[in-house]
């Protein structure tokens, strides 16, 4: 939890290098937000940006020289590193590792992202808009976050819009596990939270649900395979190919779609209902869902109200509802 908080507090600037940082670099330090630990001392007036962004110069320890010679600095590897970590170059515990910044003193190499109106950041962090690959220097996880989200379809099937993870600004999952497809089961859930009727409000819900699942429930990613808004769009969760965290005991044999909202007394609108019907057909056409699949509500396999009685009464009328035992 603490680590998650540190990451979420990090400013975008913390992981980019600017020409105004040269005094710190020349001094043998690195610019970072001074709310982060520094293995040596902090110095003011050597970094660009806010006054809280200060120059951390590591204390030189004899055993750290290999890292320093390598152009890095030794730090506890629970801290963010703007570049890559290297083992075996630092003194002390195994978790004291060499962080070598990806880029030094050059600003314009992130220009493709800047031209797009975004900024480069580690994609395990929340992006208020959409993520773009291939526009930032450094590792593949350092990606361009553009604060205004742009609607992008995964292009999986022509008759249903599936908003990609990058489009809604999903954080990088902690880990993933591939599911064996085609799956025999498909589960319907509701999020039991707020509903949404537009792209801009639905992506806010998506970000909120992902943060809740990752930060409060300590899951690797948002739990559901897909979600749906009453804007009639599907939002990609873990997607077609990953084991989810939605239906305990059945995550390895089923995919799941969750309707955003609470549908105990009110049914979702027809746009959302039709989108999920088409999503299931899309899954069949892509070989991800078996032709002989069975449809279930979450409540069919465990003690829960999910997906809400009003919604459950509708899916009971859908094709292949409980076509076989779960
Ligand atoms: Zn559920």
Image (tube, rainbow, N blue to C red):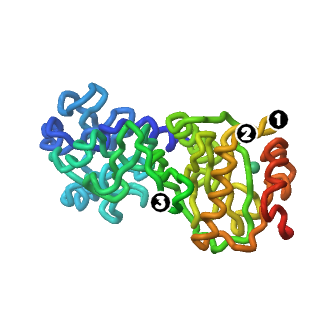
Per the image, the residue denoted by label 3 is 155
User: Quick one: SS at disc 3?
Assistant: loop
Q: Is mark 2 within 8 Å of ligand 1?
A: yes
Give the answer, above or below, for where 175 lies relative to 75.
Answer: below
Q: Is residue 252 left or right of residue 131?
A: right
The image shows residue 295 at horizontal and vertical percentages of 77, 62
Q: Are marks 1 and 3 in contact (CB under 8 Å)?
A: no
Give the answer, above or below, for where 29 lies relative to 325.
Answer: above
Per the image, the residue denoted by label 1 is 265
Q: CA distance from mark 3 to mark 2?
A: 28 Å
The circle on residue 176 is none
The image shows residue 300 at horizontal and vertical percentages of 85, 56
Image quarter of the C terminus:
bottom right
Structural crowding at the residue carrying mark 2, measured as other residues with C-alpha within 10 Å and reported as few (<14), some (14–19) or many (≥20): some
Per the image, the residue denoted by label 2 is 192
Q: Is residue 220 left or right of residue 260?
A: left
């Amino acid at each position: 939890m603490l680590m998650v908080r540190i990451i979420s507090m990090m400013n975008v600037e913390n992981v980019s290098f600017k020409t105004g940082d040269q005094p710190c670099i020349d001094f043998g330090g690195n610019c970072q937000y001074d709310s982060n630990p520094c293995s040596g001392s902090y110095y003011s007036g050597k970094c660009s940006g806010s006054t809280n962004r200060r120059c951390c110069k590591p204390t030189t320890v004899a055993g750290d020289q290999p890292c320093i010679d390598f152009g890095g600095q030794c730090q506890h590897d629970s801290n963010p590193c703007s570049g890559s970590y290297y083992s075996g170059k630092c003194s002390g515990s195994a978790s004291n590792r060499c962080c070598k910044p990806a880029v030094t003193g050059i600003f314009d190499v992130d220009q493709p992202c800047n031209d797009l109106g975004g900024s480069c950041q580690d994609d395990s962090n929340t992006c208020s808009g959409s993520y773009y690959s291939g526009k930032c220097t450094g590792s593949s996880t350092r990606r361009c976050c553009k604060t205004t989200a742009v609607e992008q379809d995964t292009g999986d099937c022509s008759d249903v819009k599936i908003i990609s993870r990058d489009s809604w600004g999903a954080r990088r999952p902690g880990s993933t596990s591939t599911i064996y497809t085609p799956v025999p089961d498909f589960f319907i859930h509701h999020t039991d939270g707020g509903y949404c009727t537009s792209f801009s409000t639905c992506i806010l819900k998506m970000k909120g649900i992902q943060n809740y699942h990752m930060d409060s429930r300590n899951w690797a990613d948002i739990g559901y395979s897909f979600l749906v808004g009453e804007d009639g769009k599907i939002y990609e969760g873990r997607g077609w190919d990953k084991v989810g965290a939605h239906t305990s005991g059945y995550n390895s044999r089923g995919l799941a779609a969750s309707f955003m909202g609470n549908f105990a007394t009110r049914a979702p609108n027809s746009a959302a209902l039709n989108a999920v019907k088409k999503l299931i057909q899309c899954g069949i056409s892509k070989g991800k869902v078996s032709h002989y699949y069975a449809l279930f509500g979450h409540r069919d396999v465990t003690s829960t109200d999910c997906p809400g009685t009003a919604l459950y009464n509708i899916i009971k009328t859908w094709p292949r509802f409980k076509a076989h035992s779960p």
